[in-house]
Image: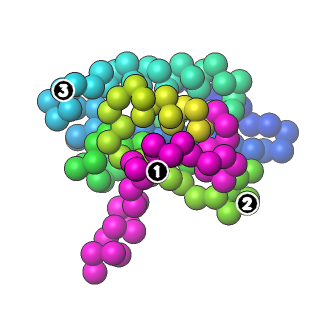
Amino acid sequence: MPKFSISAAGSRPCTLVVCRGCCCGDASKNPGTDHARQLERLRTAAAESGGRLAVRTTDCLGPCGQANVIVVQPSARARQRGARATWLGWILDDDATDDILTWAEQGGPGLADPPATLALQMIPPPSEARKRAR
């Protein structure tokens, strides 16, 4: 897995956290998606970004009904400006993957506006969803 660089300012890059738990990445749940290719595309983009983008995988993030889930974490610089992570669901095709990569390469949350198509795929983090259900 590519490592991200830390600049002299100690800045972490925009990071894509890719769920690969019980449902995300599961060919039986979403058989029309090449899950391995999707992850490889994200990792390749990170490797070619010169440290401006990082990718990591994690076990189940929670909103399984919205698989595949990817969390776009802002860079340290964007976080200092108040940016917060953006949760995206139903990332199942090349177009959605392309949109995420374009946004992340432009700086991600707090530094660039997401493509309009991604706005339709934004989901609340599980903790916020539980609060709304109360």
9 vs 118, nearest the viewer: 118
Q: Which x, y percent locates residue 105?
A: 64, 33
Q: On the picture, is 42 further left or further right than 103?
A: left
For label 3, the residue is: 31
Amino acid type of the residue tagged 2 in the rendering: Arg
For label 1, the residue is: 119
**Where 120 falls versus 134 (above or below)?**
above
Q: Which x, y percent locates residue 41?
A: 47, 21
* Residue, far right: 8
Say whether disc 3 or disc 2 marks the residue closer to the N-terminus.
3
Question: Neighbour class for label 1 at 10 Å: few (<14), some, many (≥20)?
Answer: few
Say whether disc 3 or disc 1 marks the residue closer to the N-terminus.
3
For label 2, the residue is: 81
**Mark 2 to mark 1 CA distance (whole Å):** 21 Å
**Mark 3 to mark 1 CA distance (whole Å):** 24 Å
Magenta range: 105-134
Q: On the picture, is 110 further left or further right than 118?
A: right
Instruction: Check if residue 99 falls in the magenta segment.
Output: no
Dots 3 and 1: beta carbons under 8 Å?
no
Q: Which x, y percent locates residue 66?
A: 28, 48
Instruction: Check if residue 130 falls in the magenta segment.
Output: yes
Determine whether the residue tagged by mark 2 lies in a helix, strand or loop.
Answer: loop
**Mark 3 to mark 2 CA distance (whole Å):** 40 Å
Amino acid type of the residue tagged 1 in the rendering: Ala
